[in-house]
Amino acid sequence: MLRLLDAHRHAIDTCVFCPKLCRFACPVAEAAARETVTPWGLMTRIDDVHVGRAPLDAASGALWTHCTGCHRCQAVCKHDNDVPEVLYDARAAAAAGGHAPEALLAWGRSGTPPQPAFDALPEGGPVRLVPGHVDDATVQAAVRLLDAAGHGPLGRPIGGAGASGVRLLEAGLPEAFDAAAGRLADGLEGARLVVCLDPADALALRRDLPARGRTVGAPVQHLTEAVAGRLANLTPIVEGDVLYLDACRLGRGLGVYDAPRRTLEAIVTGRVVEAVMHHAEGGCCGAGAGLAATQPALAAQVGREAVADVPGLPVVVASGVCASHLRVATAGRAVHGWATLVARALSAPSQEEE
């Protein structure tokens, strides 16, 4: 284990001896109201195991599931400590020792849902789509948007891989991630542009894969970046205001904030309203890094708290995974995936409310 964590010694030390100054920033700790699952608590347990004060056991493995990988803690940390990165290595140690929760490992290994619209695309081509773990409706919407934005002809990676495997990395299975991401990178050779529908895949291809010695030759963009400023004649289809929620890996991960908002402004008759905490300080839907698989009630509470300060308004989020999670967490509240909503506005004959 403990060689795996040696590279994080400075981050561990500065977290352990910090008076929990980032505690307010952790959506999981706020929802759970437990000091043991604050970034400080998680890093303290990692330190205890690292130096032998606590065992590497199932209890440690279970504790380390309490994170969505949202990086709000890093955004406010004076030392810029990447707590999720350390935590994923701790999860890897737990998995290697047989102490990782089965629900986390199953989530990491989970395949993508059925996506006939993706399967129908030809292999290869100049622009290749990586849908990730979004539903087929989101894929259909993305194909329409990319065509309207002039990004044709559209294809899929050679070999058919539709996700980066980033869930494997977050679940503590880094070797499996290397293999999955490598297969995808092979299937993207020769592309002019790669468009990801799940921000987690775009972040993995732009950050995690190069950090592990492999790069994708083409530019990698999230869908919101690829169509920004390229969609003409959008029709306002939503009456009134909407609440836009920043997806963690799109905002804090990729630094994409303005592009989805500008497009959304063109299709609502009212305002695009911000949560109290937005942009770099934005909340978290609760779906990330396996929390919804291992702690579903807690993940749902995280999602509810992310949108609670602006009650009543329809929610729009530019992550299909976040949208699916929030629909369950906030049952009864309208939650729209950005792609499907914008695709409806391409040729809508009149205003309507989804």
Image: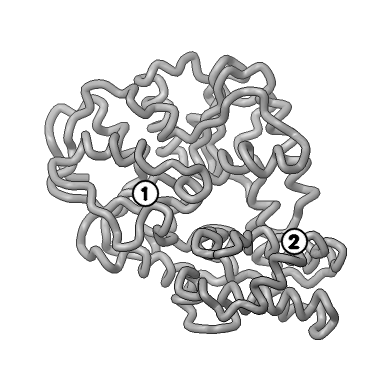
**Three-letter amino acid code of the residue under disc 1:** Val
Secondary structure of the residue carrying numbered label 1: strand
Q: Are marks 2 and 1 in contact (CB under 8 Å)?
A: no
- Which label sits in the foreground, 2 or 1? 2
Give the residue type at disc 2: Asp
Locate the N terminus by quadrant.
bottom right
8 to the left or right of 34: right
Q: Quadrant of residue 267?
A: top left
For residue 15, side relative to residue 281 (left or right): right
- Residue 161, percent across and down? 65, 33
Across and down, in percent, residue 145 comes to 37, 27
Q: Which residue is mark 2?
A: 89
Q: Where residue 329 sits: x, y (%)?
A: 39, 65
Residue 323 appears anywhere in the view: no
Instruction: Look at mark 1 in the image and give the residue it sits on.
Output: 317
Does dot 2 land on a helix, a strand or a loop? helix
Name the residue nearer the viewer: 16 or 239.
16
Disc 2 crowd rating (10 Å Cα; few below 14, some 14-19, many 20+) is: many
The quarter of the picture where the C terminus appears is: top left
Q: Residue at x 58, y 42 (%)?
A: 203
Question: Do we see residue 114 in this rendering?
Answer: yes
